[in-house]
């Protein structure tokens, strides 16, 4: 769920904003000059680690 935060609130609750981006999707922070989109992008794993796993690949493995 995308939430819109005012900049002051987002600064005071930055950990909550980052956690929400990770678990619920992008978060929007409104500033007097515009908006920010806070987006979490999961780190890709290397091929060595990917192919060391047993079993078939699952969605999100690549």
Image (cartoon, grey):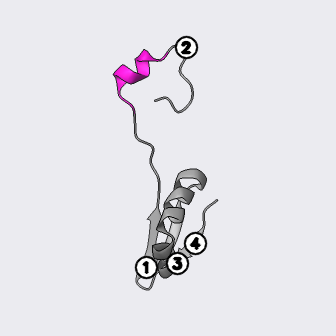
Q: CA distance from mark 1 to mark 4?
A: 13 Å
Disc 1 or disc 2, which is closer to the eye? 2
Answer yes or no: do the residues labelled 1 and 3 have beta carbons within 8 Å?
no
- 34 in magenta: no
Q: Earlier in the sequence, mark 2 or mark 4?
A: 4
User: Farthest right residue?
Assistant: 1
Residue pointed to by mark 3: 9
Mark toward the viewer: 1 or 4: 4
State the image coordinates of residue 25 (x, y, percent, origin top left).
56, 55
Which badge, 1 or 4, is on the more N-terminal residue? 4
Q: How far apart are labels 1 and 2 at the CA level?
A: 47 Å
Residue highlighted by disc 2: 55
User: Residue at 49% of width from left, 29% of height from top?
Assistant: 61
Query: Quadrant of the image for the N terminus?
Result: bottom right
Question: SS for tag 2?
Answer: loop
Identify which residue, 20 or 47, lies in the foreground. Answer: 20
User: Pointer 4: what residue?
Assistant: 4
| Magenta stretch bounds | 45-53
Q: CA distance from mark 3 to mark 4?
A: 10 Å
User: Dot 1 surroundings within 10 Å: few (below 14), some, or many (20 or more)?
Assistant: few
Q: Are marks 3 and 2 in contact (CB under 8 Å)?
A: no
- For label 4, the crowd category at 10 Å Cα-Cα, with few meaning under 14, some 14 to 19 and many 20 or more, is some
Q: Earlier in the sequence, mark 1 or mark 3?
A: 3
Label 2 to label 4: alpha-carbon separation = 40 Å
* The disc label shown at residue 34, or none: 1
- Label drawn at residue 47: none
Above or below 51: residue 35: below
In the displayed structure, does residue 38 sit left or right of residue 23? left
Few, some or many residues within 10 Å of mark 3 (<14, 14–19, 20+): few
- Total marks shown come to 4
């Amino acid at each position: 769920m995308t939430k819109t935060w005012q900049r002051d609130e987002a600064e005071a609750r930055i950990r909550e904003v980052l956690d929400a981006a990770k678990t619920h999707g992008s978060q929007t922070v409104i500033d007097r000059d515009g908006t920010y989109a806070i987006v979490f992008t999961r780190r890709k794993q290397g091929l060595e680690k990917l192919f060391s796993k047993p079993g078939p690949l699952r969605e999100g493995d690549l």
